[in-house]
């Protein structure tokens, strides 16, 4: 039985007929008939003198400027009519261009990620110091020098800035280059920082202990358009604290200032052999404490100090409601585990004047527990 194969080939973009499209037909692996072409209307027709019913027919269609089309169909009758749409190569080019752009985008993003990773690795701070301190007692202090540089110093276009930080107040940092005390470092050059570790007895006990400080990248400019921040790894120091205990002894004085009769200066000086760790606290709102003489920085009793220093306090008369009556407030100097001083502040507020008197009571707790501490005698400053 003869088989008639016919149909139309059109442009997929505008459904216009495609003339002179080349068509080859195969049944199985055998090519049937001769090569033939579509006419000016895109039509094609092939008449076979053999019976191919029950077999698979394969079309191979080619045309310059269009993609090659391959299609298979099952011959179940003596007339097969098929319409094919060919896609222009420009559409394929657009598709490949999109795919190419996507691939290039992935390559560029991967390259940027690789560069940023290299920047982070190369600009990471490297600290060189002795991590093991074998002997330090209680109420003692020890200093070590830490030299810090970026990991890859051959990266001049990466400009990091670092800052030393610690969660513990008894770790102190100071540049040892003669500049003002600072924890900020220039990552473009090697820096040496002196770290002081204090071992106050209410924070430490004898035995081995690891303490940590941190180097924080506060600014990382890469060619002035990328700004990154990240935390470096913790920097450990291993301490072996002995049971030897030193004793700080703070000498405290209170004096009125010359410019204001309501303002006083507290001077604190260590005359003992141990490292102090002190703070001041007031129990009255009318005692206002300041870190500076100008009254611009309030004193923070949560921050402890280890040096000699001065703290100011002012009597705010507007917060004292009592008149012609003696009122008392207290400023407590506490240091380490056993040291304590008490400043007793007595005030008598009158209608148009006031009087202030201060006394200091000192004790060391072991002595305090072995004797009775006598309260200071109240001054008679309200007498007319």
Image (cartoon, rainbow, N blue to C red):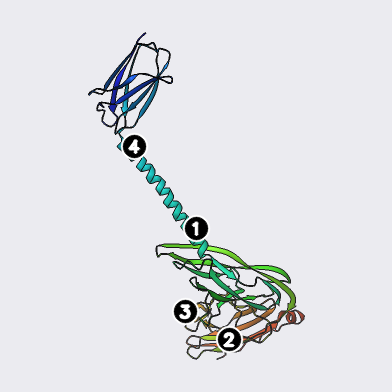
Drawn side of residue 9 relative to residue 321, left or right = left
Q: Which sits earlier in the primary sequence, circle 2 or circle 4?
A: 4
Say if 86 sits above or below 176 in the image. above
Calculate the distance from the C-alpha at mark 2 to the C-alpha at mark 4.
86 Å
The quarter of the rendered structure image containing the N terminus is top left
Foreground of the two, 303 or 312: 303
Whether label 1 touches label 4, CB < 8 Å = no
Whether label 2 touches label 1, CB < 8 Å = no
Calculate the distance from the C-alpha at mark 2 to the C-alpha at mark 1.
52 Å
Q: Which sits earlier in the primary sequence, circle 3 or circle 2?
A: 2
Residue 117 badge = 1
Drawn side of residue 85 relative to residue 197, left or right = left
Crowd class of label 2 (few under 14; some 14 to 19; many from 20; radius 10 Å): some
Classify mark 3: helix, strand or loop: loop
Calculate the distance from the C-alpha at mark 4 to the C-alpha at mark 3.
73 Å
Dot in front, 2 or 4: 4
Dot in front, 1 or 4: 4
Question: Which residue occupies 44% across, 55% down?
Answer: 112
Say if 150 sits above or below 376 in the image. above
Whether label 1 touches label 3, CB < 8 Å = no
Q: Quadrant of residue 176?
A: bottom right
Foreground of the two, 112 or 136: 112
Q: Which sits earlier in the primary sequence, circle 1 or circle 3?
A: 1
Q: Residue furthest front?
A: 34
Q: Mark 2 sits on what residue?
A: 267
Residue 296 badge = 3
Residue 92 badge = 4
Q: Which sits earlier in the primary sequence, circle 2 or circle 1?
A: 1
Question: Which residue occupies 35% across, 23% down?
Answer: 24
């Amino acid at each position: 039985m003869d088989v008639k194969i016919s149909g139309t080939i059109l442009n997929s973009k505008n459904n216009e007929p495609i003339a002179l499209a080349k068509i080859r037909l195969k049944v199985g692996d055998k090519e049937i008939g001769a090569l033939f072409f579509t006419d000016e209307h895109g039509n094609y027709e092939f008449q076979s003198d053999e019976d191919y019913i029950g077999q698979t027919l394969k079309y191979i269609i080619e045309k310059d400027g269009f993609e090659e089309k391959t299609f298979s169909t099952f011959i179940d009758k003596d007339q097969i009519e098929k319409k094919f749409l060919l896609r222009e190569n420009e559409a394929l080019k657009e598709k490949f261009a999109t795919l190419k752009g996507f691939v290039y985008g992935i390559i560029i993003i991967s390259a940027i990620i690789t560069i940023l990773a290299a920047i982070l690795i190369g600009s990471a701070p490297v600290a060189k110091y002795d991590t093991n301190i074998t002997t330090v007692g209680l109420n003692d202090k020890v200093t070590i020098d830490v030299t810090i540089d970026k990991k890859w110093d051959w990266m001049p276009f990466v400009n990091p800035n670092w800052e030393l930080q610690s969660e513990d107040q008894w770790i102190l940092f100071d540049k040892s280059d003669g500049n003002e005390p600072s924890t900020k470092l220039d990552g473009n050059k090697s820096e040496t920082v002196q770290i002081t570790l204090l071992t106050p007895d209410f924070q430490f006990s004898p035995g081995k202990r690891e303490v940590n400080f941190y180097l924080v990248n506060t600014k990382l400019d890469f060619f002035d358009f990328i700004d990154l921040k990240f935390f470096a790894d913790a920097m450990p120091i291993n301490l072996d604290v002995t049971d030897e205990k030193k004793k700080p002894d703070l000498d405290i004085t209170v004096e009125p200032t010359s410019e204001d009769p309501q303002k006083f200066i507290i001077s604190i000086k260590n005359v003992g052999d141990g490292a102090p760790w002190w703070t001041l606290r007031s129990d009255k709102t009318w005692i206002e404490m300041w870190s500076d003489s100008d009254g611009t920085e309030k004193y923070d009793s949560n921050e402890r100090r280890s040096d000699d220093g001065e703290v100011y306090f002012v009597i705010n008369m507007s917060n004292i409601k009592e008149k012609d009556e003696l009122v008392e407030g207290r400023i407590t100097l506490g240091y380490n585990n056993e040291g304590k001083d008490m400043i007793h502040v007595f005030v008598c507020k009158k209608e148009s004047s006031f009087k202030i008197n201060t006394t200091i009571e000192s004790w060391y707790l072991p002595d305090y527990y072995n004797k009775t501490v006598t309260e200071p005698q109240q001054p008679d400053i309200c007498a007319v």
